[in-house]
Image (tube, helix red, strand yellow):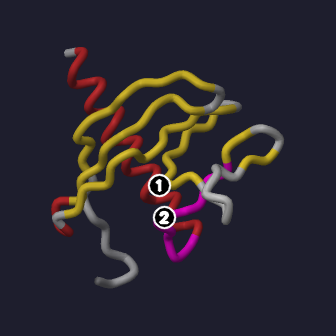
Amino acid sequence: MSEGSKLAVEVVSFKAMDRNSLKGFVTVRIPAMRLTIRDCTVHESHGKRWVGLPSKAQIGRDQELVRKDGKIQYAAVFEFDSKAVGDAFSAAVLRALDARVDGAAA
């Protein structure tokens, strides 16, 4: 795949949640790759929105959740090669989510 190519992104489902910047979880499908990514996070803060890839809670050597200042720490499961690619993915998911919401209201 060339660097300039784009993949279509579909929103399969969205579960709303309102906790600080977290607005919900979205399941995304990339048909060309036959890939479904569950539990991507949707955030909004200071007039900006973004989508994050799923992560997992960190577990320490003592088999307990790792906490910092009382908050569970998470580790990346997936990552993009660059911020630009991650931003493009986020924008594509948000467009698909907005289209899905707008289509549901019609």
Q: Could you tell which of marks 1 and 2 lies nearer the N-terminus? A: 1
> What residue do we see at 52% from left, 76% from top?
81
Identity of the residue furthest to the right in this view: 69
Classify mark 1: residues with Cα within 10 Å, few (<14), some (14-19) or many (20+). Answer: many
Picture coordinates of residue 26, whole percent (x, y): 36, 40
Look at label 1 and name its amino acid: Leu
Q: Nearer the viewer, mark 1 or mark 2?
A: 2
Q: Is residue 101 magenta?
A: no
Picture coordinates of residue 102, whole percent (x, y): 28, 24
Q: Are marks 1 and 2 in contact (CB under 8 Å)?
A: yes
Q: Nearest the camera: 14 or 6?
A: 14
* Left or right placement of residue 87 versus residue 5 in this view: right
Position of 1 relative to 85 (above/below): below
Would you identify the image quadrant in which residue 1 lies? bottom left
Position of 53 relative to 24 (above/below): below
Q: Is residue 79 magenta?
A: yes
> What residue do we see at 31% from left, 41% from top?
96
Where the C terminus falls, by quadrant? top left
> What residue do we see at 69% from left, 52% from top?
66
**Taken as a whole, is the magenta stretch helix, strand or loop?**
loop
Q: What residue does disc 2 label?
A: 77
Look at label 2 and name its amino acid: Val
Instruction: Specify the segment rendered in magenta.
Output: 73-82
Q: What residue does disc 1 label?
A: 53
Position of 43 relative to 92 (above/below): above
Identity of the residue furthest to the front in this view: 62
Q: Nearest the camera: 46 or 14?
A: 14
